[in-house]
Amino acid sequence: MPLEHPSSREVSQTMQSHQSTGQLMDDLPACIEADRMKSSLPSVNGSKKVSDFNVAAHGLRGLAAVMVLFAHILGGTAKHIYADVPAYVEGIKAPWYLGTFGVELFFVISGFVIFPSTLRYLPREFALRRFFRLYPLFFALSLIFIALNAGTNAYPKINSVETVVAGLLFLNLFTGTEQLTPNAWSLTYEVMFYILVYSIVYFVVHKRNMAAAIVMVLIATLFLVAFPIAVYFLMGVGIRLASRSEWAPRISPRFLEIAFLLLMLLFASQGHFEYRWEDFRHPAVIPIMLSTGFYFFFAVMPGSLTARALDNRLMRYLGTVSYSLYLVHPYTYFLARWAFDRYGLFTSDVAASIALFTCIVVLLTMPLTHVVHISLELWPYQRFFRQRIYRRRGAEPSLRETAAS
């Protein structure tokens, strides 16, 4: 499965970064320095690289995308098709809520996997790699949404220049407007996380400018206060640092892993939360966050049950295409729902109708996801950097920089 090739430009920039900060390495906290060394590129003479790839984190990324897919299938039909069938609406609430929690899980994973890149790359390299991993797919699907909405006016509030510009520039959180394509609201948080965490790491690690670092920490704190859901990114960063510290267990305590997994599933199925401050009055919100953090910490440890369960071809593939799956499936879902509704395929036999609908959505989604992944995720990145992102090596992927959530 895949392994990212370092380009000559990447080797050169990383060597320059290491030279400029080499005299400061002894002063770095041990947990950060461990991540920095593990994130280093191989030397030009071919010495072996230590991979940042984590089986559990990669598999959970794919699982999170599938969770969101099924949340749309269940929640969308409950809201728009079978709203007058109380048994169905009540029966799917728990799995629906749990499915929407896949977005928060994405955020934790992003914090965990992106942090090493902030140590590895200089600003231009980091920005370009994030741009080409995230933006081409987002931009293409946003253009499709803009065109469809302009023709149908299904969402009148989004048919404005201000909304379009703010959406394409990821400024919608600050303008109070909507994003341009279903699910893309979470990408604005991703981009803000990239900017804020890289700025802090840049001034702390690369430049050793504590005054600027304090300013960026204050800005990040204000963002966190304004948008508390961002705490999940911070949780992922903290787990990355904790998992590399000297006191981190080498083998995950499996009883605790299972216990916190069950608690996370239980609390996350209690409701859908947007993590405004008023949501914290709900008794499940804090337990969701705590159980998620503890579960993920144990899940990414070597030898975890999560890693064993997700270490298979299907989950490796779903993890690899998770970003495409996350953005593509709303389109196939809406198309299938429109066709089923128009041709009377949603019948009084709710269970059979939903089962058939789910199969059709999956059958439409996965081939399109694969094509989009190849053409809009891999191709622009590989074209720009003149290198393959992935190549096969052994039986599992070793990704130097996994795709965005």
Image: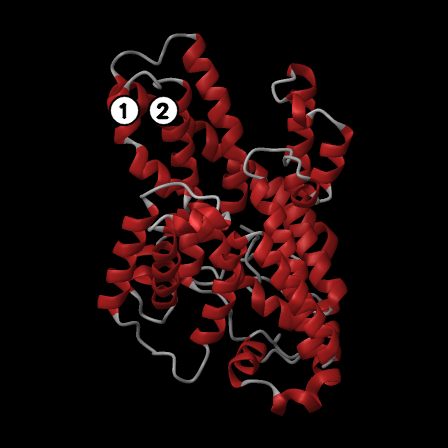
Give amino acid for label 1.
Tyr
In the rendering, at what x and y percent does residue 216 appear? 69, 67
- Return the residue found at the far top: 343
Residue 255 image-quadrant placement = bottom left
Q: Residue at x 63, y 40 (%)?
A: 375
**Callout 2 secondary element:** helix
Q: Residue 35: x and y, percent?
A: 54, 76
Question: Is residue 88 or residue 24 the one in the foreground?
Answer: 88
Expressed as whole percent of the image width and height from the top left, the position of residue 51 reads 51, 70
Q: Nearer the viewer, residue 1 or 155?
A: 155
Q: Is residue 364 above or below residue 256?
A: above
Nearer the N terminus, badge 1 or badge 2?
2
Look at the picture and state if 41 lies above or below 305.
below
Q: Are marks 1 and 2 in contact (CB under 8 Å)?
A: yes
SS at circle 1:
helix
Give residue 321's position: percent from left, percent from top.
Answer: 50, 46
Q: What mark, if any, has residue 88 been given in the picture?
A: 1
Instruction: Give the residue drawn at x 53%, y 81%.
Output: 34
> Which disc is residue 78 wearing?
2
Q: Is residue 262 left or right of residue 183?
A: left
For badge 2, the amino acid type reads Ala
Inter-mark Cα distance, 1 to 2: 7 Å
Q: Residues within 10 Å of mark 1 (few under 14, many from 20)?
A: some
- Which is more toward the observer, 42 or 256? 256
Left of 187 or right of it: where is 18?
A: right
**Residue at the image point whose x is 35% and y is 43% from the top:** 98
89 or 359, which is in the foreground? 89
Residue 336 seen in this snapshot: yes
